[in-house]
Image: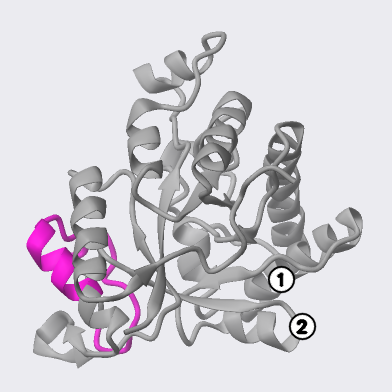
Amino acid sequence: MGRIDLNCDLGEARRGTPRWAVSLAPGAGADPADAALLDVVTSANVACGYHAGNRPTMNATAVAAAERGVALGAHPSYRDGANFGRIEHELSREEVARLVRFQLVELDMAARRHGTRVRYVKPHGALYNRIVHDSEQAAGVVDAVLGYAELAGDEPLPLLGLPGSVVLEHAAAAGVRAVPEAFADRGYRADGTLVPRTEPGAVLTDPDEVAERVVAIASGREIDAAGGARVAIAAASVCVHGDTPGALDLARRVRRGLEGAGVEVAPFVARSGSE
């Protein structure tokens, strides 16, 4: 019946929280909640330090992903730890390129130290939503992907984004693989964009509803959108946010629903194992 990737945002320890303090302890390893999600998902979008995460979380999450054959993705954001990367910043194309490239280098260095590597890029939060429509910042993200490919002497990493977004158009035009993504636990508007988190219906937490929606997306059927509309979301990957309440149960129910419907759940890129 088809194939789809299941991704999750992980490694998102925040400064000043107990999780942050634990992550800095010697030999702490991956956060237990993240490890449990890595047993379910097929791709992991790992925070690179600007909205959350730190070098120990990058190291530990990269190792845990590789052990499970989960594809490792960079999850760069605006430099905005205070707001978890959810506030837009007015930056030039060059400034966006620098901040994204720096975060990509940080995570890929951590991964390569442990015999694995970053396989794709998925921007986080406000940056993700900004580059749906902002051509200059979208071009900056693509520039970062191309710049890192040149630095690493490798092919450009695939870029995950909202279907129909400007950033995916820029990526495809530049020879970067553009991968459309859907969200299991987020509400949609009639135009296929996400309901802002400040509005009712932005975050979905009912496991049955979420699983049913994801099976519909994977099957090419329309789903409910805000205002009573219906919308079709074409996607090669679907995201369950690691910080959504009940994320582990949601991810398990989504995977079980997909597999029960005959949909293969597998990474959209080669697995993140040892080289």
x and y percent of residue 223 in the render?
18, 84
Secondary structure mainly formed by the magenta segment: loop
Q: Dividing the picture into quarters, in which one does residue 95 lie? A: bottom right
Are discs 2 and 1 less than 8 Å apart at CB?
yes
Magenta stretch: includes residue 209: yes
The label number, if any, that marks residue 142 in the structure image: 1
Q: Dividing the picture into quarters, in which one does residue 237 lie? A: bottom left
Magenta stretch: includes residue 98: no
Q: Residue at x 25, y 69 (%)?
A: 258
In depth, the one of 230 and 119 nearer the eye is 119
- Reading the image, the residue beneath label 2 is 174
Q: Which residue is drawn at 74% across and 61% down?
A: 97
The label number, if any, that marks residue 153 in the structure image: none
Q: In which quarter of the image is the N terminus?
A: bottom left
x and y percent of residue 183 in the render?
32, 67
What span is colored magenta in the figure?
A: 189-214
In depth, the one of 141 and 43 nearer the eye is 43
**218 to the left or right of 249:** right
Q: Which residue lies furthest to the top in this view?
A: 26
91 is higher (above) or lower (below) than 192: above
239 is higher (above) or lower (below) than 275: below
Callout 1 secondary element: helix
x and y percent of residue 58 in the render?
59, 34
**133 to the left or right of 93:** left
**84 to the left or right of 167:** left
